[in-house]
Structures are given as C-alpha cells and as structure tokens.
C-alpha cells in the first residue's frame, strides 16, 4: 500500500492550510476550511489505531457481558426481563464467539458486533430498577470499573481534538491501546 | 454507512410505528414533541442540506412584502454569518417604511433552521421568549417569524442586528468552538461579570404568567414535573439521534430520573446561559443575550449549573477556573444570591451539573454526529469535530456520577 493513508491526509492538510485558506476571503469559508484542516490532522493521528480500538472494545464488551451473565447465573432472584436480555447475549455470543479469532475479521464485522453488545449492556443498565437490591448492588459494583475504562479510552481517543481542558493529563491513545508492543487486552 | 442493528436502522429511517414509540416513551412538552416528531418524519426524505442560499433572496422579499404590506421594499446584501452552530444565520439590509412617511434602511438578521439541527427547537417558542424578554433584559428585537418555514423554506425568525463583541481577541493557538473555554482579559472580566450575573437574576425574576408564552407547557409547582419534561427531552433526543449505544449515558439518565429534585416555583430558565451567548459594546455594556431556543420553565439551578460548568469556562492568568470565563464560582454564586434573593442549594447545583454534562453529551456525541451523518446541516465538518466535546462530556459525567454514588 503506497502511499500510506497518513501521507494522503498530511498532503491534503498542507494544501488546505497553505494554499486554500490564505486565498479565502469569506470568513465562514475560512472557519470551515480551518475545521477541515484540523479534522485531517486528527485523522492522521488516529487512522492506524481505529481497527485496534474496536478490537479492544470487542474484548472488553465480551468480558463484561460474560461477567454479567455469570452474576445472573449465580442468583435466583433475577427477574424474567433480565433473563431475557441474558438470552439475547447468548445469541450474540453464537454470532461472535467469545474465543473467536476476531482479529482476523473485517472491521465492519467487529464494529457491528460491538454495537450489538453495547446495546445489550445498555438494556441491562436500564433494567436495574427491576433487579432486587442485592443483585443491583453487585451489578453496579461490576460496572463501575468498566465505566471508568470507557471514560479513559474515549477521552484519550479525542485528546487531539482540543476540547479537553485536561488534555495533558490524558494518556495518548497508543499508550492506552498497546502494551509491550501488543494490543493491551490482558486487563479485560 | 452501515446500520449495524435494527435500532440504528430505525433511527436512520424511522417507521411510523417507531416514531409513535418514541413519542410515547418520553414525557415532553407539546411544542417539543411537535418539532421532534417533525424531525423524524423529515428524516425519511433523502435531502442533503444545501449551502447555496442565493435562492433565499426572492422568498425573503416576498415574505417581507407580505408581512409589512409594502410592495416597494428592498432586500439587499444578504450574507451568511460565521459561527452559530445550531442555526444558520444571515444578515441583510431592509429598506422600508417602519411608519408612514418614514423610509429607512435597517440591518436585520435571519435565524433559520438547517435541514436537521444539533438541537431541534421551536422558532415560534424562541420568538415568544425573545418578545417576553424585550424591555426586561437586553435581547434582539424580533420583527417577523415564519414558524414552519412555509415561505422561507425552513423555520426562521427575523430580528434586529446588533453590533458588538461576542468573542474578544484570544491568545494565539487557542481557537475554540462556540464560546468553549474562551479567555477574557481582567479588565473585561471586571466590566462584564457582574452584569452577566445580574441579568440572569433578572431573567429568573420575570413573572412569566404575565407574558405570552403559549408554546410553553406549565409544569406543576412543588413537583418534579419540570425535570421530568426536561429529562424527557434530552433522553428522547439521545434515543432518536445517537449512532452508538453508550453505557455511561444509560447510567446517567437512570441516575437523573431516580434523583430528580422538586422544583418549587418554576422560573424561565434560559437553557444556554454562558460565554458565547452574550454580546457587549466597546463601553463594556452587555447589549444582547442570545440563543433562547432551549428556554423552559424550570429550576434556576439549571442555569447556574450551566453557567458555572467547568467545560465551558476558561481560566484566569494563574490557571484558576472561571465560571463562564468571567468569575470564580464562589463569587458568581454569591453575587447571584444577592441579586436574585434566591438561595443556592449546592446539592441541587451538583445534580444540575450532572444533567448539564448529560445535555452536552447528547448534543455533541449524538445529535451533532447524526446531522453530519445525514449531511443535513450547514456545518457537517464541524459537527463531526464536535464529537470530541461529547466524549469529554461523557467522561466528566462518569466522574461526577462516581462521586454522587460513592
């Protein structure tokens, strides 16, 4: 593959910044061209990490949903609606098996599977008021570190967009995704 | 782009049944239901938003001829205004007779819905609240309105154009979006901050029962109804617009619903009271408060929370955070209590800080991305870019929820 995507993006950014923008007289057009150039810069930084971002999420969501199912399997008090959601998770795990060599799958397969798992986890969260107190407490305890991992990952992903007043305190997305040169899936 | 799940397919191409499900699922004011339902029906039409506004000139002329009853008016210098994330804004010069025997040229502005906006709001409602504020606090004068866009193509209001500064000169390489993290020099802060708070206190003191605000539903006093409607609006927007489910957003909305404070006597809440939504003159007088489209009857703590939100405010020269880039939070709240006579309840303020981050996440992580996905706005590139603000908001939301549930 040549040139690499990064090179295409970098060339477009330079052209917009150094050729197009200085010759624009309309303020609205200047403003929008500036955003296009900044977007290209952002894409240049993250484009080679998008696949691994989704792959990491795939492992994380499989991990948390497995943990929720295990929690529900060990309780007699799960309401029917929650059990129905569990059954849907099992269906999803038939389509994208927990031990599937998913890293060999196309990006869209992984992205689609992740979206299904996100929706199912959101249903469990919505169903908390239906859970008995003890089950709900256990569920919340399980979820808290998972919420934290989403918080850190998403904030690192958008760090270069310039909205974060605490950007300097956020990890670079590469440092968060990889450990010892490999995708950091051991924590999930 | 792919619709990975049936839910995502419904959001992109809503069926009549799904639209009715959305309407039944979230308690909202009738005007909000009207614009949200219209948005979903319109989503089925394969229309991209056009940037060409040259065709606006003739309908604008005909609309104004009808509104003024004058055939010999002139519309000239129609231009797009930069900025304005949620609505398209244009200026033009109108030559007409405001009263018999007096012919004048006046510069006016148009505030118009794009094909789909980052916040779907009601132009008649916005014009009503602007008219209610006219003479009470500094606002542009609303002259005419096309609430459904039957004549101008999109819903729009036409108001007086005011001169002034919204964004003062910023330090190099600190370009931010729509008032986020803006910097005001100490002399500007000294001149503007107290006015900014006093105007907010005045808005909250206005007796809305004496105003024509027929598009506003009135919530019961001493109840949670105002908050039920407000949460209903934002939860419905999230569920109609997002391109991806988000566990933190589900956590947040559940917590917001389970911890809703009672609203004693509802006031007019501006809904977007912060830096970037006011203008000042060279004499440092605030001469306009903008962006009233999210106004509703609710708890004054909602505006206080929005105006003191860390994400919007910049810092002073030592890096200490400033509410709305103007004042330290403790000074802001103390001044507000003195000016309004309202007591600030810090527990309620914390609740509305969580609600505020939820709203920002809905706008920036869901609706902005949706309208760019459908190519239905005048700012598609910016709307994708703004998703970064949404991720910071969900992150802050999670931090605050961890604190609230510790």
Image: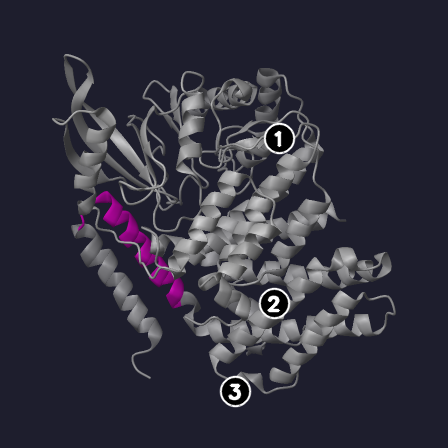
- When asked about the image quadrant of residue B6, the answer is bottom right
Q: Quadrant of residue B302?
A: top right
Report the disc number at residue A118: 2
B317 w.r.t. B104: above or below: below
What is the x, y in percent for residue A51?
Answer: 49, 75
Q: Secondary structure at mark 2?
A: helix
Locate the N terminus of chain A by quadrant: bottom left
* Label number found at residue B299: 1
Question: Most prominent secondary structure in the magenta stretch?
Answer: helix
- Which residue is drawn at the image coordinates 26% and 65% (left, top)? A12
Q: Chain of mark 3?
A: A
Is label 1 in contact with label 3 (beta carbons under 8 Å)?
Answer: no
* Residue situated in front as seen by the camera: B32 or A28: B32
The single residue placed furthest to the left in the displayed view is B72
Secondary structure of the residue carrying numbered label 1:
loop
The reply to whether the magenta stretch includes residue B230 is no
User: Is the residue marked by circle 1 packed among few (<14), some (14-19), or many (20+) residues within 10 Å?
Assistant: many
- Residue at x 36%, y 32% (from the top left corner): B166
- For the residues marked 1 and 3, what is the alpha-carbon distance in whole angstroms? 53 Å
Q: Is residue B279 left or right of residue B104?
A: right
Where does residue B228 sit, x and y in percent of width and height?
64, 41
Q: Chain of mark 1?
A: B
Whether discs 2 and 1 lie on one chain: the answer is no
Q: Which residues are magenta?
A: A24-44
Residue B299 placed where, x, y %?
A: 62, 30
């Amino acid at each position: 593959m040549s040139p690499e995507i990064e090179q295409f993006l970098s060339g477009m950014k330079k052209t917009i910044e150094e050729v197009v923008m200085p010759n624009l007289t309309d303020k609205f057009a200047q403003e929008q061209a500036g955003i296009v150039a900044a977007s290209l810069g952002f894409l240049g930084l993250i484009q080679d990490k998008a696949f691994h971002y989704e792959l990491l999420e795939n492992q994380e969501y499989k991990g948390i949903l497995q943990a929720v199912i295990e929690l529900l399997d060990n309780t007699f008090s799960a309401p029917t609606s929650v059990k129905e959601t569990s059954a849907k998770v099992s269906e999803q795990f038939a389509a994208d098996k927990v031990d599937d060599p998913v890293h060999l799958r196309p990006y869209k397969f992984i992205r689609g599977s992740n979206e299904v798992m996100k929706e199912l986890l959101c249903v469990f969260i919505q169903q908390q008021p239906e859970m008995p107190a003890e089950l709900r407490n256990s569920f919340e305890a399980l979820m808290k570190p998972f919420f934290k991992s989403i918080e850190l990952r998403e904030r690192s992903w958008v760090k270069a967009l310039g909205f974060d007043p605490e950007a300097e305190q956020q990890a670079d997305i590469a440092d968060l995704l990889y450990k010892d040169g490999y995708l950091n899936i051991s924590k999930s | 782009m792919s619709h990975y799940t049936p839910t995502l397919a419904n959001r992109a191409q809503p069926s009549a049944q799904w639209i009715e499900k959305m309407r039944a699922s979230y308690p909202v004011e009738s005007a909000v239901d009207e614009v949200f339902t219209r948005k979903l029906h319109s989503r089925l039409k394969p229309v991209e938003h056009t940037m060409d506004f040259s065709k606006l000139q003739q309908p604008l002329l005909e609309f104004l001829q009808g509104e003024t009853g004058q055939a010999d008016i002139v519309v000239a210098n129609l231009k797009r205004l930069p900025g304005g994330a949620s609505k398209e804004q244009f200026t033009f010069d109108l030559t007409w007779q405001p009263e018999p025997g007096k012919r004048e040229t006046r510069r006016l502005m148009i505030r118009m819905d794009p094909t789909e906006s980052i916040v779907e709001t009601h132009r008649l409602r916005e014009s009503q609240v602007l008219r209610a504020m006219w003479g009470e606090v500094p606002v542009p004068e609303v002259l005419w309105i096309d609430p459904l866009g039957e004549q101008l193509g999109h819903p729009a209001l036409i108001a007086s154009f005011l001169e002034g500064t919204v964004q003062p000169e910023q330090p190099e390489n600190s370009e931010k979006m729509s008032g986020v993290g803006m910097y005001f020099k100490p002399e500007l802060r000294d001149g503007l901050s107290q006015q900014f708070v006093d105007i907010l206190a005045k808005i909250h003191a206005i007796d809305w029962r004496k105003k024509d605000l027929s598009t506003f539903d009135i919530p019961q006093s001493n109840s949670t109804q105002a908050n039920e409607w407000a949460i209903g609006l934002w939860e419905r927007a999230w569920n109609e617009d997002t391109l991806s489910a988000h566990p933190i957003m589900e956590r947040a909305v559940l917590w917001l619903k389970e911890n809703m404070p009672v609203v004693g006597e509802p006031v007019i809440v501006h809904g977007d009271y912060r830096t970037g939504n006011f203008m000042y003159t060279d004499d440092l007088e605030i001469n306009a408060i903008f962006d009233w489209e999210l106004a509703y009857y609710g708890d004054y703590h909602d505006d206080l929370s929005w105006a003191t939100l860390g994400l919007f405010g910049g810092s002073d020269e030592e890096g200490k955070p400033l509410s709305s880039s103007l004042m330290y939070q403790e000074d802001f709240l103390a001044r507000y209590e003195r000016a309004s006579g309202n007591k600030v309840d810090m527990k309620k303020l914390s609740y509305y800080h969580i609600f505020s981050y939820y709203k920002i996440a809905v706008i920036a992580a869901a609706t902005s991305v949706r309208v760019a996905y459908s190519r239905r706005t005048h700012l598609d590139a910016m709307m994708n870019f703004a998703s970064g603000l949404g991720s910071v908001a969900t992150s802050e939301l999670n931090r605050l929820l961890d604190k609230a549930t510790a």
